[in-house]
Amino acid sequence: MAEAISDGCPDCAGQLLELCDELLARASDFPDPGEFIGLVAARLTAIGLPILRLAAGGELLHPTVEGMGWRWRPSTGVEALMMERRESWDVEEWIKSPIRHLIETGGQSIQLPTDDDRLAAQFPILAELRQEGVTEYLLFTERVRGALRITVDNDVWVSFAHGGRFRIDQATAKGLGRIASILVLIIQANAALVTVRTLLSVYLGDDAAQKVLDGNVLRGRADPISAVIWYSDLADFTKITDEKPPKGVLALLNDYAATISDELARHGGNVLKFTGDGILAVFQQDDGAARALAAVDDTRRVVAQLNERRAQRGAPTTSVYVALHHGELLYGNFGSTTRMDFTVLGQAVNQVARIAALSRSLDQPVILSEAFALAAPAERHRLVSLGRYALRGVTRPQNLFTLDPTA
C-alpha cells in the first residue's frame, strides 16, 4: 500500500528563514552560481527537505547562447547548462514546460505534485521527475527589472523538486520563494559579469578585452608593440554587393569572416577590426611570422572547403587576398571621450593596407612585405620575390614576396 502524503515539512519554515540570512550574508560575494546552488541543496536537505533536483537559470545577452543554467542532483552534483540560441523555440519540451507557462501567463510561482496524471500530461517533466522519486515540484520565476536587467524580457527561474512524503505548506513555500529570490540575485549578478566579458571579447577581441578589464580605459593610453600584421579581404566583393541582395551579402560576409577569424584565432592571431570585407589582425608572439604563414595555408584550405559547401547550395563564392607585414605599432585606446576603439595605429598598418591593394593588380592571393621576410628567416625558403614596388604614401619602393607553390 502506498505511503500516505502528509501536509507540511516539520519545522521547515523557521529554518528556511535562518537559511535566507546565511545566503544573504554570502550574496555580496557573488560566488559562482553553481557552487551556491550546491550549497542551497545541501542546506535544504539538512533541514528536512529531501531535495532530489534543484535547477535555476536565466537569459544571456550573447551572440550564440540563449541562456545559462545549473542543475543539481544528489548523484551528479551541479551541472552547468548552456542553451544555444535558436531562431524559434517551438520544440515540445519548451512548449509544455512549466517555465514557459509561468512566463506567458505572468505567474510567479507554481506548485505541482508529480502523481497527478492530468498535470503530467500538461507538463511532461513531472513524469520524468516522478521516475526519479520526486513527489512535488515547485517553480519560481522572476522578471528582472531596473538596473540589473540585461535583456528586454529578462526572466530568471528557480525550481525545487523534493522526494518527501509530504506537501509543501504555504509557509514553507514562502520561504523557498525567498531563497529563490536570493538565487535570482546571484544568477543575475553572474550573468552581468559574463555579459560584460563576452561582449568585450566579441567586439574588441580576447586580448584587447582583457586589457580593458585590467584597467586600460584611458583615452590615448597605448603601448608600443612589435608584431606581424595581417590584412585580408575578399575577391570581387564590390561586384557581389552589386549583384546580390543585402541579406545574401550579409550571409556571405558572416560565412567568410567566421571561417577566417576562427583560423586566425587557432594560430594565435588577434583579430582587431572588421572593415567591410577586410580583416585586420596581429600576431605578437616570437614565432608570429611562422604562425601567420601557417594561418595563411590553413585559411586558404578552409575557404576552399567553404566554397564547396556554398556552391552546393547555389550561394555565391569568393576567395581571400592576404597581405602580411611586420612593424612597430601603438596598441591601445584611441578616440573621443565618449567613443573609443581599442586597436593598433602606426605607419605599418597603412603599409599593409597598401600592400593588400596590390593583390589584384599583381594577381597574387598572398603578398608579403620585405619587413615580414626579414622577420621570418626560418621561412625564407618558402618566399619568392615579386620585385620592387612603390606604395602610395611610402617614401621608398618596397621588395615584395609571395609564397613559392613548389616550396
Image (cartoon, rainbow, N blue to C red):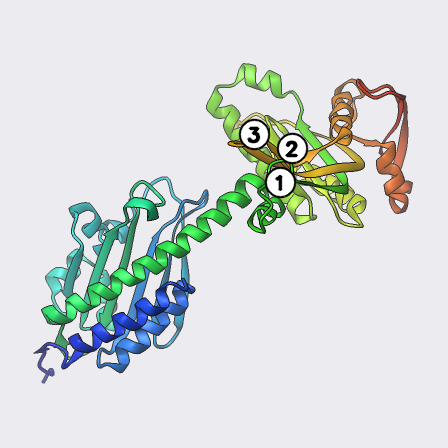
Whichever of labels 3 and 1 marks the residue nearer the N terminus, that label is 1
Q: Residue 228: where, in percent of width, then height?
A: 77, 40
Residue 173: quadrant of the picture: bottom left
**Residue 265 visible in the picture:** yes
**Relative horizontal placement of residue 280, taking residue 376 as reference (left or right):** left
Whichever of labels 1 and 2 marks the residue nearer the N terminus, that label is 1
Q: Please state, as top left, top right, bottom left or bottom right, where the C terminus lies in the image.
A: top right
Within 10 angstroms of label 2, few (less than 14), some, or many (20 or more) residues? some
Whichever of labels 3 and 2 marks the residue nearer the N terminus, that label is 2
The CA distance from mark 3 to mark 2 is: 23 Å
**Residue 279: mark:** 2
Q: Are marks 1 and 2 in contact (CB under 8 Å)?
A: yes
Q: Nearer the viewer, residue 225 or 269?
A: 225
Q: Residue 107: where, in percent of width, then height?
A: 16, 51
Q: Amino acid at mark 3?
A: Ser
Q: Is residue 118 above or below residue 345?
A: below
Q: Amino acid at mark 2?
A: Ile
Q: Please state, as top left, top right, bottom left or bottom right, where the N terminus lies in the image.
A: bottom left
**SS of the residue under disc 2:** strand
The CA distance from mark 3 to mark 1 is: 28 Å
Q: Which residue is mark 3?
A: 336
Within 10 angstroms of label 1, few (less than 14), some, or many (20 or more) residues? many
Q: Which residue is mark 1?
A: 261
**Residue 344: mark:** none
The residue lying at 15 percent from left, 66 percent from top is 174
The CA distance from mark 1 to mark 2 is: 8 Å
Residue that extends furthest to the bottom in the rendered view of this protein: 1
